[in-house]
Image (cartoon, rainbow, N blue to C red):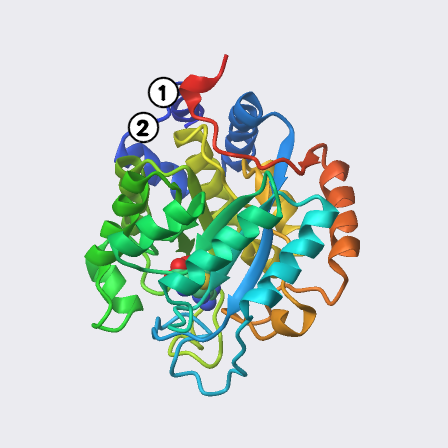
Amino acid sequence: MYNTIDKLFKNHDISDKELTDLITSAEYDDYLFEKADIVRKKHYGNSVYVRGLIEISNYCKNNCYYCGIRAENSLVERYRLLPDEILKCCETGYSLGFRTFVLQGGEDIYYNDDVVCSIISDIKASFSGCAVTLSLGEKSYLSYSRFFEAGADRYLLRHETADNDHYRLLHPQSMDPDNRKKCLFDLKKIGFQTGAGFMVGSPFQKTGNIISDIRFLKTLNPEMIGIGPFISHKNTPFGNYENGSVQLTLRIIALVRLMFPDALIPATTALGTMLDDGRERGIKAGANVVMPNLSPQDCRKKYEIYQNKLYSGEESAQALLKLRKKISSIGYTVSMERGDHKPENSLT
Ligand code: SAH
């Protein structure tokens, strides 16, 4: 198996059978993580990029079976940030040195194209040199184009699962897996740095699904890849399902780093929720991005896509300081640069 890892390290690909063997065995994790770390250091050095996450709304018109803010969860206290409030969050973040703002939310119809575009252009005009990332779900080609024209740089839209049958087990029939994939290809075509990804250990997920996910990623070739464990939320249809495994998530992160050497890969909040040092372990396994929360403190708890979501009641400044310490304690450096994707062929 060490040979297989060496082959993956060299060629950035192996066969499905070899991938399956690696995914289903914990024995080689140390070696795998070591190799993944070498690859990420070659491309991005010791830097861990930070993104200021602003959770703009927990209203959602969708009903994904796994998600705590699904429309039918009547126990959620709903909130929505108005454009001015979003700008305020950016202001705080900008003064702390953040140069990427990620606006994430449920699919909330309040934010029509005009509203989103004006938020984007206000942020770009007020905070020079910053990147804007959106994570607002599925939209039309035209809407995405308008966001791009308004100045948005990146878009995160996890494909969730590449297997259409599996997708249907995780979502109501009204949601269409092919449309989600189409959205991702649209985003790439328009010119966004595009992020796809999936949960590890989502209900009914088989090893074969993970292979399909990785193959889908190879076809899409996204700039960013988000992978985190599934964490059940009691007020959803999947309330009684088991959480995904941290170790398997780390293994998949390492494999994905080896297969996509230049991808920006976050150590997700979900990893940090499952384990105190989950995010640090994610970094050691090949991740190179963290996304601290810049949302107003009273909203953080309400944006509960899964249970016990890691959130701190701390001031953003305090949280950033702690994060810096944690990251440097494991031998990496927090970078406050925009941290754009660096294509492999751009390296000198
Ligand atoms: N509405 C946006 C943002 C969704 S939340 C969109 O459609 O893209 C961001 C991600 O959180 C989702 O893509 C999903 O992969 C993840 N997520 C949702 N519920 C989760 C859960 N219970 N456990 C772990 N991750 C979850």
Q: Amino acid at mark 1?
A: Asn
Q: Secondary structure at mark 1?
A: helix
- Position of residue 214 relative to residue 102, above or below, is above
Q: Amino acid at mark 2?
A: Ile
The label number, if any, that marks residue 11 in the structure image: 1
Residue at 59 percent of width and 60 percent of height: 274
Q: Could you say where residue 33 lies in the image, as x and y percent from the top left?
A: 54, 33
The label number, if any, that marks residue 37 in the structure image: none
Q: Could you say where residue 180 lies in the image, as x and y percent from the top left?
A: 27, 56
What's the CA distance linking mark 1 and mark 2?
A: 8 Å
Evaluate whether residue 230 shows in this view.
no
Around disc 1, counting alpha carbons within 10 Å, would you say few (fewer than 14), some (14 to 19), or many (20 or more)? few
Q: Residue furthest bottom?
A: 74
Q: Is residue 34 left or right of residue 16?
A: right
Q: Secondary structure at mark 2?
A: loop
Kindly identify which residue carries mark 2.
Answer: 14
- Position of residue 238 relative to residue 194, above or below, is below
Q: Could you say where residue 12 lies in the image, as x and y percent from the top left?
A: 37, 25
- Position of residue 238 relative to residue 42, above or below, is below
